[in-house]
Image (spheres, rainbow, N blue to C red):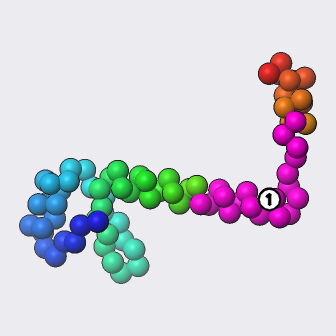
Amino acid sequence: MVRVTNIQDLKTAVNENGEMVIAMNNNDIVIMKMEEYRKKLLKEDIEKNLVKAEDDIRNGRVRDAREVFKEWKEEYGI
């Protein structure tokens, strides 16, 4: 991340780093490279899906993969 204290710092950061994103986080303004931001979003999405998957496992919302593949083969020829 880049620490910016004025508009000139922002211009310099954009010129040096290319495409950037600006976001509000509570009362803070965060500026980061677009690539870094995309990685952050991907990480958050993966973490969210892992939490959901763990909840599914804990609550028995699972099926044996062999059964699913057998059904797919019968139904779709896969």
Main secondary structure type of the part rendered in magenta = helix
Residue 59 magenta-highlighted:
yes
Above or below residue 30? Residue 26 is: below
How many tags in the picture?
1
Q: Any magenta on residue 23?
A: no
| Range covered by the magenta-colored residues | 47-66
Residue 69 falls in image quadrant: top right
Residue 16 falls left or right of residue 51: left
Task: Give the residue at x 32% y 52%.
Answer: 34
Query: Extreme top residue here?
Result: 77
Where residue 54 sits: x, y (%)? 74, 61
Q: In this view, does 27 lie to the left or right of 10?
A: right
Q: In which quarter of the image is residue 64?
A: top right
Q: How crowded is mark 1: few (under 14 residues within 10 Å), some or many (20 or more)?
A: few
* Residue shown at the point (20%, 53%) measured from the top left: 17
Amino acid at pointer 1: Asp
